[in-house]
Image: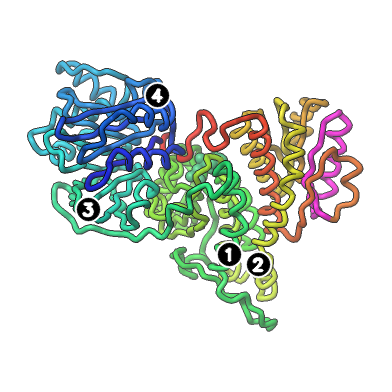
Amino acid sequence: MCGIVGFIGDGSPVDAVVAGLKTLEYRGYDSAGVAVVSGRGLETIKAVGRVTALEEKLSSFANECSAAIGHTRWATHGKPIEENAHPHLDASGKIAVVHNGIIENFISLREKLIAEGHKFEGDTDTEVVAHLIGKNYRGDIVEAVETTIAELDGTFALGVICADEPEIIVSVRRGSPLVIGLAEGKTLLGSDAMPILPFTRKAIFLEDDQVACLNKNGCVVREKGKEIPLDITEITWDAEMAEKGGYKHFMLKEIHEQPVVLEKMVRSRIIDSGKNESKESFPTLNVDGLNLDEEYIKKISRIVIIAQGTAYNAGMVGRNMLERVARISSSPEYASDFRYRDPILDSSVLVIAVTQSGETLDTLEGVRMAKESGCKVLSIVNVVGSSIARESDGVFYMNVGPEIGVASTKAFTGMIAAFYVIAIHFGIVTKKLTANETRRRIADLSGIGPRCDAVLSTEQYIKSVAKKYKDATNSLFLGRGTGWPLAMEGALKLKEVSYIHAEGYNAAEMKHGPIALIDENMPVCVIALKGRRYDMIMGNIQEVKARGGKVIAIASHDDEQIADIADDIIYIRAENGIMNSILCSIPLQLLAYHIAEARGCDVDKPKNLAKSVTVK
Ligand code: F6R
């Protein structure tokens, strides 16, 4: 995890780095620090806690310098204390390093350096890197970094400055994200594009082991010691999109963005919805980026969906869609388990990697393993240019805009919509869908924006329900069919932002254990929309009520029975399968948000979490 930033050139490097670090706090916020190089040499300032704590320390610090690097930390090696905060210095105190990632062989490297007389202030793997670069320094910091990375195992994105070469910053990555921004008279680096967006949209995404030497007029990229041409990408997001837009928290803003971003995404994927009623008139979808030809799709024997956390829950919904719409056998897997097993894979198996950040390490390693086993990999990703997007054979970009709130919301519903488009495309290609059926399914997707808006309009009522349950210590979320992954997601959202213990279960499993927990102190949130499993769900609600449990039901707007048994009911205008899974997610997100708010929790920065999990 962790976020790194760098700035060299005209302007105020420290201010730019601090502003950049604030945008990266979603990656970790245990401690923060900056190092600057100026006429006075190299200076570092660090603080435990949020970037604001660092900012306070910096208020008395002169901002005259040519370059600065900064770091916001999510502790892996060593406690969140100042000694372990980055930047770390080499033995001479002339070289400073910020690092995101994990150096797997740092213990052996550290022991060797200690035997040679090096002394370490903290416990981090990064300090070892700084000492190694210092040891390898012979007057050329780029060469010292190149020599050093050959000795490192693991993952890293590094920013390095040197007092003796104040006009450059050196940067390199292996497995960890890194973006370089090229602006007029200044050059930047960041763990994602947010720190560079206020200055430029021109970006370079380095490949593994490419070393960049940044100066105020641009940068030089080297691979194996030789300069290579720059591969410049234009970023289409703008920094304003990531501001809070008047909402108290990013999480709330992102929940409210769903009508717009989902509608936009769906429209961009439907070229023609096949209004013509003829048997042969199939709708036309835009499947740009998938990169899977029709002959290949027809031969897919099985789909394995790999993901973590919320993305895994979306993968469970995706499995149901692929099975039902495209009739292709599919199974969701936690990437963290998949990559360490011996799964049976061959070229007929399609692996779909689902990830908002495109950087989750287990998912990335799962992608690599799948490719080595001869599978094609399609990824559903939000962050453009991320590692998983770049390593996949094809990418479906959700394009829901930057997601800053640590608890994923719009990316979850974006993933569901993406799965539906993919499932329909596969169903058309494999001829499992008729033209009529395809038109009906495409129609399901249209009008998604206004329907999400209608659910959001119940927010004040959901807030009042949230207040009622804010002091709960435990809770259950139940659902069947697609309601099951939604229940898992509802529970995950609640626990991560409010710290209330929450379990998401398939309602059918309740009798096999969780029912023992039900009493008058146990709120049970049930996804109870009308549909194939409605009667069974109503039976489960009766069982909860019979044991004194309190039921919060998410129900169809025209359900006349549910008011007789549920304690609190959030009605949604349920229309059809795909729409329901998206619409149902919104009250679950709002419930979690407002419960957390009522408990006074720091919604956007829940304790112990980080937005992008780039460690095993
Ligand atoms: C929960 C949440 C996490 C992520 C998980 C995977 O709200 O955000 O569970 O879903 O860490 O992250 P990505 O989608 O970036 O691979």
Tell me the residue that label 3 is attached to.
Answer: 185
In primary-sequence order, the first of circles 4 and 2 is 4
Tell me the residue that label 2 is attached to.
Answer: 446
Q: Amino acid at mark 2?
A: Ser
In primary-sequence order, the first of circles 1 and 3 is 3
Q: Amino acid at mark 3?
A: Gly
Residue behind label 3 places its C-beta within 8 angstroms of ligand 1: no
Q: Residues within 10 Å of mark 3 (few under 14, many from 20)?
A: few
Label 1 or label 3, whichever lies nearer to me, is 3
* Disc 1 to disc 4: CB gap under 8 Å: no
Q: CA distance from mark 4 to mark 3?
A: 32 Å
* Disc 2 to disc 1: CB gap under 8 Å: yes
Tell me the residue that label 1 is attached to.
Answer: 266
As helix, strand or loop, the secondary structure at mark 3 comes to loop
Q: Is residue 312 visible?
A: no
Residue 23 position, x and y percent, is: 42, 42
Quadrant position of the C terminus in the picture: top left
Q: Residues within 10 Å of mark 4 (few under 14, many from 20)?
A: many
As helix, strand or loop, the secondary structure at mark 1 comes to helix
For residue 467, the mark is: none
Q: CA distance from mark 4 to mark 2?
A: 48 Å
Q: Which residues are magenta?
A: 528-557
